[in-house]
Amino acid sequence: MATKRINLSFSMDRENDAKVYNILSTQRYKTDYVIKAVLSYMEKRDKDFNKETVKQAIKEALREYGIDSKDLNKIENNEEKLPGEIFDMFNTL
């Protein structure tokens, strides 16, 4: 298996660069530390996926297709099944 290298430079004039440099400087196994830090960050970012943002975007798209907020409220409260137009909207994507 091939080994790849990445060179990093830190500007000690920038606060975040200096912080990270100091953290990495104290680590004995820098590569392992960076791998764990990056993977942890990516996993957290994926978990923080904002469902509310997606929900609002879908509501906006439905409104563009003529489904009003009254219909959306009924759908949210499970008082009514999804209108057929929603499937047409997804088919056009």
Image (cartoon, rainbow, N blue to C red):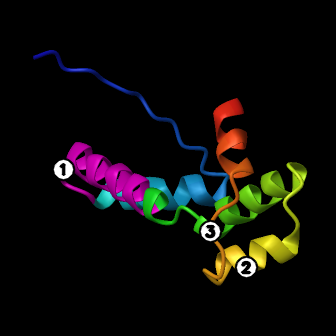
Q: Residues within 10 Å of mark 1 (few under 14, many from 20)?
A: few
Q: Nearer the viewer, mark 1 or mark 3?
A: 3
Residue 64 in picture, x, y percent from top left:
89, 50
Does residue 76 appear left or right of residue 32 in this picture? right
The residue depicted at 45 percent of the width and 56 percent of the height is: 46
**Mark-to-mark CA distance, 1 and 3:** 56 Å
Residue at mark 3 to residue at mark 2: CA–CA distance: 8 Å
- The residue drawn where x is 80% and y is 51% is 61
Task: Return the residue nearer the eye: 87 or 46.
Answer: 87
Disc 3 residue crowd, few under 14, some 14–19, many 20+, Cα 10 Å: few
Disc 1 to disc 3: CB gap under 8 Å: no
The residue shown at (80%, 72%) is 71
Element on which disc 3 rests: loop
Which stretch appears magenta?
27-44
Identify which amino acid the numbered label 1 is placed on: Tyr
- Helix, strand or loop at mark 2: helix
- The three-letter amino acid code for the residue at tag 3 is Lys
Q: Secondary structure at mark 1?
A: loop
For the C terminus, which image quadrant? top right
Q: Which residue is mark 2?
A: 74
Question: In this orientation, does residue 42 appear?
Answer: yes
Residue that label 1 marks: 29
Q: Is residue 29 magenta?
A: yes
Amino acid, disc 2:
Lys
- Residue beneath disc 3: 81
Quadrant where the N terminus lies? Answer: top left
Q: Earlier in the sequence, mark 2 or mark 1?
A: 1
In this rendering, would 45 be left or right of 52? left
Residue 68, quarter of picture: bottom right
Q: Nearer the viewer, residue 30 or 43?
A: 43
| Label ID, residue 60 | none
